[in-house]
Image (tube, rainbow, N blue to C red):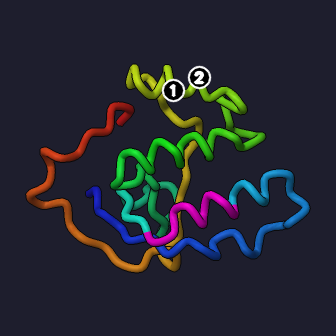
């Protein structure tokens, strides 16, 4: 069941290796997500974790998606804002891979009941 989670991700990547080429990128991603509401669903593959589906704020979600696309291993639109915009606007955009969040990085949950008409995920 999809839930809305209030994220507390500011320090989510603090323990990662600072020598990793994408360390600063993911610190920025965690900072950008911090305090935001996001759609999540319990992971069936990673017990106890939540699959991140997107930010509740669609404009911020778009910017976050582009930030995540700068990852050197999974990014498809690295330094290609125009290609990303085209895919996003045509609703053909899908992030490569799955991003999971451990419960310690979630401050609270709220239900989606009564909000189903407001949800629009073209890639789900």
Q: What residue is drawn where x is 86% and y is 66%?
A: 18
Rendered view: 69 above or below 50: above
Along the line of sight, which residue is nearer the eye, 109 or 68? 68
Q: Residues within 10 Å of mark 1 (few under 14, many from 20)?
A: some
From which residue to which does the magenta span run? 27-35
Residue 31 magenta-drawn? yes
Instruction: Tell me the SS state at disc 2.
Output: helix
Along the line of sight, which residue is nearer the eye, 63 or 123? 63
Residue furthest left as drawn = 114
**Disc ID at residue 82:** 2
Please tell me whether the stretch drawn in magenta is mainly helix, strand or loop.
Answer: helix
Residue 23: x and y, percent?
A: 78, 59
Residue 24: x and y, percent?
A: 77, 59
Left/right of residue 61 with respect to residue 1 in the rendered view:
right
To which quarter of the image does residue 106 belong?
Answer: bottom left
Position of the N terminus, as image quadrant, is: bottom left
Left/right of residue 98 with respect to residue 44 in the rendered view:
right
Dots 2, 1 in contact, CB < 8 A: yes
Q: Residue tagged by mark 1?
A: 85
Left/right of residue 59 with respect to residue 64 in the rendered view:
left
Residue 122 magenta-drawn? no
Q: Residues within 10 Å of mark 2 (few under 14, many from 20)?
A: few
Q: What residue is drawn where x is 59% and y is 21%?
A: 83
Q: CA distance from mark 2 to mark 1?
A: 5 Å
Q: What residue is drawn where x is 32% and y is 38%?
A: 121
């Amino acid at each position: 069941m999809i839930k809305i989670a209030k994220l507390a991700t500011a320090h989510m990547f603090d323990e990662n290796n600072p020598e990793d080429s994408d360390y600063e990128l993911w610190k920025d991603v965690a900072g950008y997500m911090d305090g935001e509401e996001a759609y999540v669903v319990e992971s069936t593959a990673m017990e106890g974790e939540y699959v991140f589906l997107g930010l509740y704020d669609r404009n911020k979600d778009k910017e976050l998606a582009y930030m995540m696309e700068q990852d050197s291993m999974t990014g498809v639109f690295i330094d290609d804002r125009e290609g990303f915009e085209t895919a996003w606007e045509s609703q053909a955009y899908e992030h490569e891979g799955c991003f999971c969040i451990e419960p310690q990085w979630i401050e609270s949950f709220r239900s989606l009941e009564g909000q189903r008409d407001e949800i629009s995920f073209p890639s789900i």
